[in-house]
Image (spheres, rainbow, N blue to C red):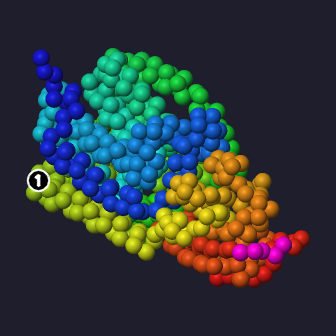
Amino acid sequence: MKGPRTTRLAIDWRYLAVAAVAIAVRLPHLSDRSIWFDEASSWQTASYGWNDLLRSVRLNVHMPLYYLLLKGWMAVFGESAASIRGFSVTFGVATVLLMGQFARELFRASTACRPADDGDEPAAARSFGFVVAMLVALSPVQVFASIEARMYTMGTAFAALSAWLLLRIVRTGGSTRAWTAYGLSVLGLLNSHHYGLFSVGAQAVFLGLYLIWLAGVGRGDEARRLLFPAAIVGLLVAMADLPTLGILRTQVGRVQRDYWIRPLSWHSFVSTFGYFIMPNPADLPRPEARLILGLVAAVAAVLAMGGRRGEGFVVASALLPMAFSAAVSTITPVWAPRYFRFAHLFVLAAVALAVWRLTMRRPALRSCLCASLAAGLLYANVAFWRGLDLAHNTGMRAAVATILERIRPGESIVSTELLQYLTAKFYAEGRAPIHLVEPPPDMFWGWHVIRPADLISLDQLRDKMTRGIWLIGTIPKLIVAPDWDLDDASLMEEYEFHYYMGLHKKIFVHHYAGPVDRHADGVTGRAGG
């Protein structure tokens, strides 16, 4: 016998169309867009053997699950830029479809749904799910998360899945299988990114308040039926997550000592809402940030008026992670716009639900507003890609390609900075020797992706210069060491490349070849370029 339609992951042609749109806006420049340091660090970490991989994670500030899964993915699909980014695209499309399923459940739990919850799923729920899925598919914030070889879309997929399962459990009472699936999705979210803890915390707060409300209105039996399995699942998830707590404790200490995030300010708080509509790789503030902040506040107010558990859940999932992050930032700065990609999913769902509620008697107006939202996000998506200016910001991909076209036998590539070294190493693909000038022992960051074989000492560099080297750095006059100055006569070629990422900005390549005068204080002469 067939079960209710809501017990199946029903994907009709509209959801297939949404998936196609999601893929289409995520595939451009998958290969020719130069990777940046964070993506290169994902590749490097996943390329290590098991022991080195876990050591790298302990020295980093992220959880191991993404790197372990990426390692398996690379074993099957290879290590190209398209491959490692394709892993994120896959999770990004899954996020779109799962948010569609979540939205269908959200609709049934909200005041936008007029029929009783225990009936068949109304057709309007499927339409609402389609709208939310399309908004997620077109959102530049979610597109940006999908086109990077990072763990964010793995986290958004688990966030959408866990939210869908929890709302469904609350409606149906939850079978053992449903609670098990929810526990596994929560565990996946916790092990995707540290901000997953804030999203799980928001779900826990919602469930706790909902149980209190049930008890207060005389539905204690229903509250108890949810409380006991929730407590068991929570305990099991906490026990399963214990091995990562030691990693988290070490990483929090490192963040407190020397991480780059600035203290939370009103400016950074408001700027986050500008990021919600149009992310900027350089994290620049956007002028429309205050407008988006006002819109989010208005949406929360609309949903709070006469709302049911659906409204409470989506508002909690959208806003509580920000409140938790702000609270933690009073101790350790952790507020960064791109970390709210998980909460952003529910901001989109909340906006769509507010539109739906306000236009319940005006379906034509609703269609117009939903189409306008989608069109606005599509325009922002086009503007996002245009802003990258990839035709001119060719980055390390072009720099290394230029070197490999011209490098002579016996010559080496040497980077003076870690940020440039790792991306250059990715694109060199073992086709030429490449090293990093040995950094000082007190270098505050980056040791998690450095191994002894990566480094070259100044004495070794002097010897290599007699055979020819290609130096990569971020300043026109490359400084190898304080007591070094490079001879004009040895400078053969020089090039400049630009990046679309603010962390890199410009890359300067200098080709030095020929004999070098040696003195006690290093190499003498005047720098070229």
Q: Nearer the viewer, residue 63 or 395?
A: 395
Residue 329 position, x and y percent, is 59, 51
Q: What residue is shown with label 1?
A: 363
Q: Judge whether residue 327 can be spotted in this image.
A: no
Residue 406, compared with residue 244, is above or below; it is below
| Closer to the camera in the image, 486 or 123 | 486
Measuring from the top left, give residue 10's x and y in whole percent.
18, 34
In this rendering, the answer to whether 242 lies above or below 420 is: above
| Residue 516 is inside the magenta segment | yes
Q: Residue at x 22, y 39 (%)?
A: 104
Residue drawn at point x = 60 percent, y = 67 percent: 408
Q: Examine the structure image and report whether residue 97 is included in the region drawn in magenta.
A: no
Please state, as top left, top right, bottom left or bottom right, where the N terminus lies in the image.
top left
Left or right: where 175 falls relative to 202: left
Q: Residue furthest front?
A: 409
Q: Is residue 42 left or right of residue 434?
A: left
Residue placed at 59% from the left, 37% from the top? 49
Residue 33 in view, yes or no? yes
Nearer to the camera, 95 or 110: 95
Secondary structure under the numbered disc 1 in the rendered image: helix
Crowd tier of the residue under label 1, counting other residues whose Cα lies within 10 Å: few below 14, some 14–19, many 20 or above: few
- Dividing the image into 4 quarters, which one contains the C terminus? bottom right
Residue 2 x/y as whole percent: 13, 21
Give 413 or 36, whichever is nearer the viewer: 413
Please name the amino acid that badge 1 sits on.
Pro
Q: How many marks?
A: 1
Q: Residue 334 location, x and y as percent?
A: 57, 51
The magenta region covers 514-518
Q: Main secondary structure of the magenta part?
A: loop
Q: Is residue 490 left or right of residue 381?
A: right
Residue beneath the point at 49% across and 21% down: 236
